[in-house]
Amino acid sequence: MKRILALLPLLILCFSHSFAQEEYVHYEPTEADYAYRELRAKPSIPPYGLDKVKGLIKKVTFAPSDEGDAGISALSASQYDGLSLREKFTYTMIHPEAYSQNCAIFIYSKDEHKLIYSYLISWMDETTWSERQVNFLRDNRDSVMQIIQESVNRSKRMGVNYKDAVVEINAWEMIPYLINYYKTNKQDVDVLTTLLLLMKQGEYAPFLQSASYSKLYGSDYNYERYINLNQANEELIVQRAMGYYGDKIANK
Protein backbone atom coordinates (compact mmCIF):
# COMPACT_ATOMS: atom_id res chain seq x y z
CA MET A 1 0.00 0.00 0.00
CA LYS A 2 2.82 2.40 0.87
CA ARG A 3 4.31 1.94 -2.60
CA ILE A 4 1.05 2.94 -4.26
CA LEU A 5 0.38 5.91 -1.95
CA ALA A 6 3.87 7.23 -2.58
CA LEU A 7 3.13 7.36 -6.30
CA LEU A 8 -0.25 9.11 -6.07
CA PRO A 9 1.01 12.75 -6.24
CA LEU A 10 3.15 11.97 -9.27
CA LEU A 11 0.34 9.90 -10.74
CA ILE A 12 -2.00 12.90 -10.60
CA LEU A 13 0.66 15.15 -12.14
CA CYS A 14 1.30 12.72 -14.96
CA PHE A 15 -2.28 11.60 -15.46
CA SER A 16 -2.40 12.76 -19.06
CA HIS A 17 0.52 10.46 -19.86
CA SER A 18 -0.34 7.44 -17.80
CA PHE A 19 -3.83 6.19 -17.13
CA ALA A 20 -5.76 2.94 -16.91
CA GLN A 21 -7.46 0.97 -19.68
CA GLU A 22 -10.82 2.67 -19.14
CA GLU A 23 -11.06 4.75 -15.96
CA TYR A 24 -8.53 4.55 -13.17
CA VAL A 25 -9.69 2.35 -10.31
CA HIS A 26 -7.29 1.78 -7.45
CA TYR A 27 -5.97 -1.77 -7.35
CA GLU A 28 -3.84 -3.07 -4.51
CA PRO A 29 -1.12 -5.27 -6.08
CA THR A 30 -0.39 -8.65 -4.57
CA GLU A 31 3.06 -10.12 -4.04
CA ALA A 32 2.44 -12.19 -7.17
CA ASP A 33 1.74 -8.97 -9.09
CA TYR A 34 5.00 -7.44 -7.89
CA ALA A 35 6.89 -10.60 -8.86
CA TYR A 36 5.40 -10.68 -12.36
CA ARG A 37 6.08 -6.98 -12.91
CA GLU A 38 9.68 -7.53 -11.82
CA LEU A 39 9.95 -10.40 -14.30
CA ARG A 40 8.60 -8.24 -17.12
CA ALA A 41 10.98 -5.37 -16.35
CA LYS A 42 14.08 -7.51 -15.84
CA PRO A 43 16.77 -6.88 -18.47
CA SER A 44 19.18 -9.42 -19.85
CA ILE A 45 22.84 -8.92 -18.91
CA PRO A 46 25.16 -9.76 -21.81
CA PRO A 47 28.42 -11.47 -20.81
CA TYR A 48 30.60 -9.89 -23.50
CA GLY A 49 33.35 -7.93 -21.77
CA LEU A 50 31.00 -7.44 -18.82
CA ASP A 51 33.62 -6.83 -16.12
CA LYS A 52 35.52 -4.40 -18.35
CA VAL A 53 32.36 -2.49 -19.25
CA LYS A 54 31.16 -2.33 -15.63
CA GLY A 55 34.55 -0.99 -14.59
CA LEU A 56 34.32 1.81 -17.14
CA ILE A 57 30.74 2.66 -16.18
CA LYS A 58 31.76 3.11 -12.53
CA LYS A 59 33.98 6.01 -13.56
CA VAL A 60 31.35 7.79 -15.65
CA THR A 61 30.08 11.14 -14.37
CA PHE A 62 26.70 12.72 -15.07
CA ALA A 63 26.63 15.87 -17.20
CA PRO A 64 23.34 17.79 -16.82
CA SER A 65 21.83 19.73 -19.69
CA ASP A 66 21.26 23.47 -19.57
CA GLU A 67 17.58 22.88 -18.79
CA GLY A 68 18.44 20.82 -15.73
CA ASP A 69 15.83 18.10 -16.27
CA ALA A 70 17.96 16.11 -18.70
CA GLY A 71 21.56 15.11 -19.17
CA ILE A 72 23.91 12.36 -20.18
CA SER A 73 26.08 9.81 -18.41
CA ALA A 74 28.43 8.49 -21.05
CA LEU A 75 31.87 7.14 -21.77
CA SER A 76 34.22 9.50 -23.55
CA ALA A 77 34.51 9.09 -27.32
CA SER A 78 37.93 7.48 -26.98
CA GLN A 79 36.74 5.03 -24.32
CA TYR A 80 33.68 4.13 -26.36
CA ASP A 81 35.64 3.72 -29.59
CA GLY A 82 38.05 1.43 -27.74
CA LEU A 83 35.31 -1.11 -27.11
CA SER A 84 34.75 -4.06 -29.42
CA LEU A 85 31.38 -4.47 -31.11
CA ARG A 86 30.23 -7.00 -28.52
CA GLU A 87 31.45 -4.82 -25.67
CA LYS A 88 29.50 -1.90 -27.12
CA PHE A 89 26.44 -4.15 -27.19
CA THR A 90 26.91 -4.99 -23.51
CA TYR A 91 27.40 -1.31 -22.69
CA THR A 92 24.23 -0.34 -24.54
CA MET A 93 22.17 -3.06 -22.90
CA ILE A 94 23.20 -2.27 -19.32
CA HIS A 95 23.84 1.49 -19.40
CA PRO A 96 21.43 3.77 -21.28
CA GLU A 97 23.38 7.02 -21.52
CA ALA A 98 20.68 9.68 -21.76
CA TYR A 99 18.57 10.97 -18.86
CA SER A 100 15.32 12.87 -19.16
CA GLN A 101 12.75 13.46 -16.46
CA ASN A 102 9.42 12.02 -17.53
CA CYS A 103 6.03 10.95 -16.25
CA ALA A 104 6.04 7.33 -17.39
CA ILE A 105 4.24 5.37 -14.70
CA PHE A 106 2.90 1.92 -15.42
CA ILE A 107 -0.06 1.39 -13.09
CA TYR A 108 -0.62 -2.12 -11.82
CA SER A 109 -3.58 -3.98 -13.29
CA LYS A 110 -5.18 -7.10 -11.92
CA ASP A 111 -3.87 -10.34 -13.43
CA GLU A 112 -1.27 -8.72 -15.68
CA HIS A 113 -0.05 -12.19 -16.61
CA LYS A 114 -3.36 -12.64 -18.44
CA LEU A 115 -2.95 -9.48 -20.54
CA ILE A 116 -1.16 -8.66 -23.80
CA TYR A 117 -0.02 -5.04 -23.63
CA SER A 118 0.33 -2.58 -26.49
CA TYR A 119 3.85 -1.57 -25.48
CA LEU A 120 6.77 -3.05 -23.60
CA ILE A 121 7.18 -2.04 -19.99
CA SER A 122 9.77 0.60 -19.16
CA TRP A 123 13.01 -0.84 -17.78
CA MET A 124 15.24 2.24 -17.97
CA ASP A 125 13.49 4.40 -15.33
CA GLU A 126 14.17 7.95 -16.54
CA THR A 127 17.09 7.01 -18.76
CA THR A 128 17.05 6.05 -22.39
CA TRP A 129 19.47 5.11 -25.13
CA SER A 130 21.42 8.06 -26.48
CA GLU A 131 21.65 8.89 -30.17
CA ARG A 132 25.07 7.24 -30.21
CA GLN A 133 23.66 4.04 -28.76
CA VAL A 134 20.64 3.95 -31.07
CA ASN A 135 22.92 4.50 -34.06
CA PHE A 136 25.13 1.66 -32.87
CA LEU A 137 22.17 -0.73 -32.75
CA ARG A 138 20.87 0.32 -36.16
CA ASP A 139 24.26 0.46 -37.89
CA ASN A 140 25.12 -3.04 -36.65
CA ARG A 141 21.65 -4.48 -37.14
CA ASP A 142 22.66 -7.93 -38.40
CA SER A 143 25.25 -8.38 -35.67
CA VAL A 144 22.80 -7.21 -33.00
CA MET A 145 20.22 -9.77 -34.12
CA GLN A 146 22.86 -12.49 -34.07
CA ILE A 147 24.14 -11.53 -30.62
CA ILE A 148 20.64 -11.37 -29.14
CA GLN A 149 19.78 -14.83 -30.41
CA GLU A 150 23.10 -16.21 -29.23
CA SER A 151 22.61 -14.69 -25.78
CA VAL A 152 18.99 -15.86 -25.47
CA ASN A 153 19.92 -19.38 -26.54
CA ARG A 154 22.52 -19.46 -23.81
CA SER A 155 20.51 -17.90 -20.97
CA LYS A 156 17.09 -19.26 -22.03
CA ARG A 157 15.43 -15.88 -21.44
CA MET A 158 14.88 -12.65 -23.34
CA GLY A 159 15.01 -9.55 -21.17
CA VAL A 160 12.98 -6.45 -21.92
CA ASN A 161 16.11 -4.63 -23.12
CA TYR A 162 16.60 -7.25 -25.82
CA LYS A 163 12.96 -6.90 -26.87
CA ASP A 164 13.39 -3.12 -26.97
CA ALA A 165 16.44 -3.54 -29.19
CA VAL A 166 14.49 -5.85 -31.53
CA VAL A 167 11.84 -3.17 -31.93
CA GLU A 168 14.38 -0.34 -32.20
CA ILE A 169 16.12 -1.96 -35.16
CA ASN A 170 12.84 -3.24 -36.64
CA ALA A 171 14.15 -6.81 -36.61
CA TRP A 172 11.27 -8.41 -38.51
CA GLU A 173 13.66 -11.16 -39.62
CA MET A 174 13.55 -12.44 -36.04
CA ILE A 175 9.80 -13.12 -36.10
CA PRO A 176 10.14 -16.93 -36.53
CA TYR A 177 12.77 -16.97 -33.77
CA LEU A 178 10.55 -14.93 -31.45
CA ILE A 179 7.62 -17.27 -32.06
CA ASN A 180 9.71 -20.38 -31.43
CA TYR A 181 11.08 -18.80 -28.25
CA TYR A 182 7.57 -17.97 -27.07
CA LYS A 183 6.37 -21.52 -27.61
CA THR A 184 8.80 -22.72 -24.94
CA ASN A 185 8.49 -19.60 -22.74
CA LYS A 186 4.75 -18.96 -22.56
CA GLN A 187 5.17 -16.93 -19.37
CA ASP A 188 6.98 -14.26 -21.41
CA VAL A 189 3.84 -12.67 -22.82
CA ASP A 190 5.74 -9.53 -23.84
CA VAL A 191 7.10 -11.51 -26.77
CA LEU A 192 3.60 -11.18 -28.23
CA THR A 193 3.79 -7.43 -27.58
CA THR A 194 7.09 -7.38 -29.47
CA LEU A 195 5.42 -9.08 -32.44
CA LEU A 196 2.61 -6.52 -32.33
CA LEU A 197 5.09 -3.64 -32.34
CA LEU A 198 7.00 -5.09 -35.29
CA MET A 199 3.76 -5.35 -37.30
CA LYS A 200 2.76 -1.83 -36.28
CA GLN A 201 6.16 -0.46 -37.22
CA GLY A 202 6.01 -2.24 -40.56
CA GLU A 203 2.49 -0.89 -41.20
CA TYR A 204 1.23 -4.39 -41.98
CA ALA A 205 -2.23 -3.74 -43.44
CA PRO A 206 -4.08 -6.83 -42.10
CA PHE A 207 -3.00 -5.80 -38.61
CA LEU A 208 -3.62 -2.05 -39.01
CA GLN A 209 -7.17 -2.80 -40.18
CA SER A 210 -7.95 -5.19 -37.32
CA ALA A 211 -10.12 -4.66 -34.25
CA SER A 212 -7.18 -5.50 -32.00
CA TYR A 213 -5.10 -2.70 -33.55
CA SER A 214 -7.88 -0.20 -32.89
CA LYS A 215 -8.12 -1.32 -29.29
CA LEU A 216 -4.37 -1.24 -28.72
CA TYR A 217 -3.28 1.74 -30.80
CA GLY A 218 -6.44 3.70 -31.64
CA SER A 219 -6.78 7.46 -31.34
CA ASP A 220 -7.25 7.25 -27.57
CA TYR A 221 -4.52 4.67 -26.97
CA ASN A 222 -2.02 4.77 -24.14
CA TYR A 223 0.91 2.69 -23.02
CA GLU A 224 -1.30 0.54 -20.82
CA ARG A 225 -3.82 -0.58 -23.42
CA TYR A 226 -4.18 -4.33 -23.64
CA ILE A 227 -6.11 -7.24 -25.02
CA ASN A 228 -6.78 -10.41 -23.10
CA LEU A 229 -4.34 -13.27 -23.29
CA ASN A 230 -6.25 -16.25 -24.60
CA GLN A 231 -5.68 -18.93 -27.19
CA ALA A 232 -7.59 -17.08 -29.90
CA ASN A 233 -5.62 -13.83 -29.52
CA GLU A 234 -2.34 -15.68 -29.13
CA GLU A 235 -2.88 -17.69 -32.31
CA LEU A 236 -4.06 -14.63 -34.24
CA ILE A 237 -0.98 -12.62 -33.31
CA VAL A 238 1.33 -15.46 -34.31
CA GLN A 239 -0.58 -16.03 -37.55
CA ARG A 240 -0.50 -12.37 -38.50
CA ALA A 241 3.16 -12.01 -37.57
CA MET A 242 4.08 -14.93 -39.80
CA GLY A 243 1.96 -13.39 -42.57
CA TYR A 244 3.88 -10.15 -42.16
CA TYR A 245 7.18 -12.03 -42.19
CA GLY A 246 6.15 -13.89 -45.34
CA ASP A 247 5.27 -10.65 -47.10
CA LYS A 248 8.60 -9.09 -46.15
CA ILE A 249 10.52 -12.11 -47.44
CA ALA A 250 8.54 -12.14 -50.68
CA ASN A 251 9.21 -8.45 -51.30
CA LYS A 252 12.81 -8.41 -50.12
Image: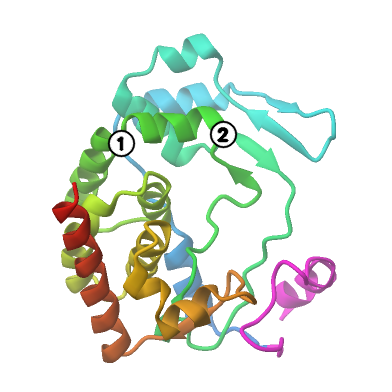
User: Outermost residue, top direction?
Assistant: 78
- Determine whether label 1 and label 2 are within 8 Å by CB: no
Q: Residue at x 48, y 87 (%)?
A: 111
Check if residue 24 falls in the magenta segment.
yes
On the image, which quarter does residue 61 sit in?
top right
On the image, which quarter does residue 227 sit in?
bottom left
Residue type, label 2: Ser
- Element at badge 1? helix
For discs 1 and 2, the disc positioned in front in the rendered view: 1
- Element at badge 2? loop
Q: Residue at x 71, y 43 (%)?
A: 100
In the image shown, does 151 or 167 lie closer to the viewer?
Answer: 167
Check if residue 12 falls in the magenta segment.
yes
| Boundaries of the magenta span | 1-26
Q: Which badge, 1 or 2, comes first in the chain's sequence?
A: 2
In the image shown, does 123 or 204 lie closer to the viewer?
Answer: 204
Residue type, label 1: Arg
| Any part of residue 189 in sight | no
Q: Residues within 10 Å of mark 1 (few under 14, many from 20)?
A: some
Disc number for residue 130: 2
Q: Is residue 34 above or below residue 109?
A: above
Location of mark 1 (residue):
141
Residue 244 screen position, x and y as percent: 25, 64
Residue 120 screen position, x and y as percent: 47, 63
Q: Residue at x 20, y 64 (%)?
A: 181
Q: Residues within 10 Å of mark 2 (few under 14, many from 20)?
A: some
Between the residue at mark 1 and the residue at mark 2, the CA separation in whole angstroms equals 16 Å
| Any part of residue 65 in sight | yes
Disc number for residue 80: none
Q: For this view, does 26 lie left or right of residue 167?
A: right
Residue 250 screen position, x and y as percent: 14, 55
Residue 96 screen position, x and y as percent: 54, 38
